[in-house]
Image (cartoon, grey):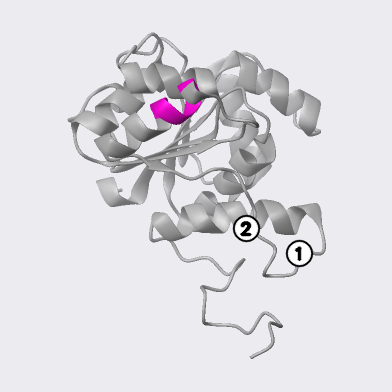
Amino acid sequence: MSGQERITLAMTGASGAQYGLRLLDCLVREDREVHFLISKAAQLVMSTETDVVLPAKPQAIQAFLTEYTGAADGQIRVYGKEDWMSPVASGSGAPAAMVVVPCSTGTLSAIATGACNNLIERAADVTLKERRQLILVPREAPLSTIHLENMLKLSQMGAVILPAAPGFYHQPQTIDDLIDFVVARILNLLNIPQDMLPRWGEHHFGVDD
């Protein structure tokens, strides 16, 4: 696949594992190759918030997610936190876009300072230095001055900060509708087709004229 068809998806230890899993499913359905990274904290959150319990090793996670999403063999590629030889660790091999969803404030801070202590942080650093698309989806409340300063710094570097803050103008009926709102916004930024949420102006949401 071309660079435009490959996406790095990272999940870290903030609440909102459902967003990352739903995005993964959508990317697979749109025939994107996904380079998947997940922190230990994110695995713990996922097992707490969902019925998905991932195995420990990258190869086992890859097999599990391939079956879970119905992906083709090799469509999802999972890398460990210190797999420095993976494509996402170098500007010559990394995909054109990276999404961190959910993005913990710790990961946000590490990316903002260029820490590169693990593969998620390194992949984000590569995305920034190569001037590629980086979308960060934090889920935290309230936000401290430190959080806001890190978000501003990253925004000034070219990253997109997309808080996991669903709207209600589409009149959601279920939790899945709220999840889809955020995931649809991510897909719009990636210029990937989605039918979960009409773009503004394409549908009348019941607001009086």
Q: Is residue 108 above or below residue 66?
A: above
Q: Residues within 10 Å of mark 1 (few under 14, many from 20)?
A: some
Residue 181 is marked as: 2
Query: Residue, x 55% and y 58% (percent of image)?
Result: 184
Evaluate whether residue 86 shows in this view.
no
Residue 75 among magenta residues: no
Residue 113 is marked as: none
Q: Amino acid at mark 2?
A: Phe
Disc 1 designates what residue?
172
Image x and y of residue 104, in percent:
55, 25
Q: Secondary structure at mark 2?
A: helix
Image x and y of residue 16, in percent:
67, 36
Evaluate whether residue 150 shows in this view.
yes
Q: In which quadrant of the rendered view does residue 97 lie?
A: top left
Residue 147 among magenta residues: yes
Q: Amino acid at mark 1?
A: Pro
**Disc on the earlier residue, 1 or 2:** 1
Total marks shown come to: 2
Q: Are marks 1 and 2 in contact (CB under 8 Å)?
A: yes
Q: Secondary structure at mark 1?
A: loop
Please report the bounds of the magenta region as a residue range. 146-150
Q: Is residue 84 above or below residue 98?
A: above
Query: Residue, x 66% and y 21% (percent of image)?
Result: 43
Q: Residues within 10 Å of mark 2 (few under 14, many from 20)?
A: many
Query: Residue, x 49% and y 24% (percent of image)?
Result: 145
Query: Residue, x 53% and y 65% (percent of image)?
Result: 194
For residue 79, side relative to residue 102 (left or right): left
